[in-house]
Amino acid sequence: MTMETETRTLSRSPELRATGTGRMLTGYAAVFNSPADIGGAWIETIERGAFTRALEGDIVAIIGHDRNRVIGRTGAGTLRLSEDGKGLRFEIDLPDTTDGRDVAVSVERGDIGGMSFGFSVTRQQWDRTTEPPQRTIQQVELYEITVTAFPAYPDTSVGLRSLDDARKEAAIAAREAKRSHIDRRLRMRAQLDIRSRA
């Protein structure tokens, strides 16, 4: 099964700080153990430690999920990511470019009101005994963090496919369990037939 890329948006505004060499954007791209309603389809939380392995990769900071508008990169040292007790913390040294200056102005004015991140889930747990179902994200592969003007989880279409995948996996597991049960009964019946003939 291929991993789908998902995005989630957090409605917490980043902070803009002046540094000796320019401007830095700081804040959280994700918060742990904070339930989020994903379009009414399910409730999702991210476990502490979900990003630990992902932080070893080369991750970019971009604008509005546009990979052509890079404003920081872990590989270049212009984006720093870390996990703490609250969530996925970031620091971006904004470039002295049109995009960097535009982001700074938009944050100051309050036009940009959130952060988002693009990821694939590599380990998760579903609880389908509740309505809506509960999804706990335990580990991700992280591709990007994004400054965005549209907080509050607007992009759930890929995430809905993830729920469908989980339901398909559960149906396959149920069929396999049923098949295994039938096979066991057939073997037991065959063994009884052999014994009764002996």
Image (tube, rainbow, N blue to C red):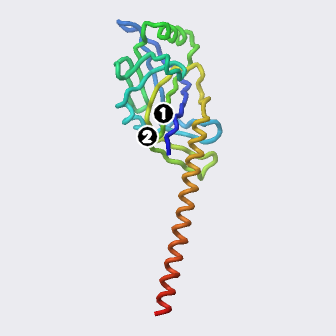
Q: Residues within 10 Å of mark 2 (few under 14, many from 20)?
A: many
In which quadrant of the rendered view does residue 54 lie? top left
In which quadrant of the rendered view does residue 48 lie? top left
Query: What amino acid type should be assigned to the residue bearing mark 2?
Result: Gln
Residue at 59 percent across and 41 percent down: it is 161
Residue at 36 percent across and 6 percent down: it is 21
Upstream in the sequence, badge 1 or badge 2? 1
Q: Tell me whether the residue at label 1 lies in contact with that at label 2, contact meaning CB atoms closer than 8 angstroms.
A: no
Helix, strand or loop under label 1: strand
- Which percent across, then down, holds residue 105? 52, 8
Residue at 45 percent across and 39 percent down: it is 47
Q: CA distance from mark 1 to mark 2?
A: 10 Å
- Which percent across, then down, holds residue 182? 55, 71
Q: Nearer the viewer, residue 197 or 74?
A: 197
Q: Nearer the viewer, residue 22 or 158?
A: 158
Q: Nearer the viewer, residue 194 or 33?
A: 194
- Mark count: 2
Helix, strand or loop under label 2: strand
Q: Work out whether 192 lies above or below 30.
A: below
- Which percent across, then down, holds residue 183? 52, 72
Residue at 64 percent across and 47 percent down: it is 131
Query: What amino acid type should be assigned to the residue bearing mark 1?
Result: Phe
Q: Which residue is mark 1?
A: 119
Q: Which residue is mark 2?
A: 139
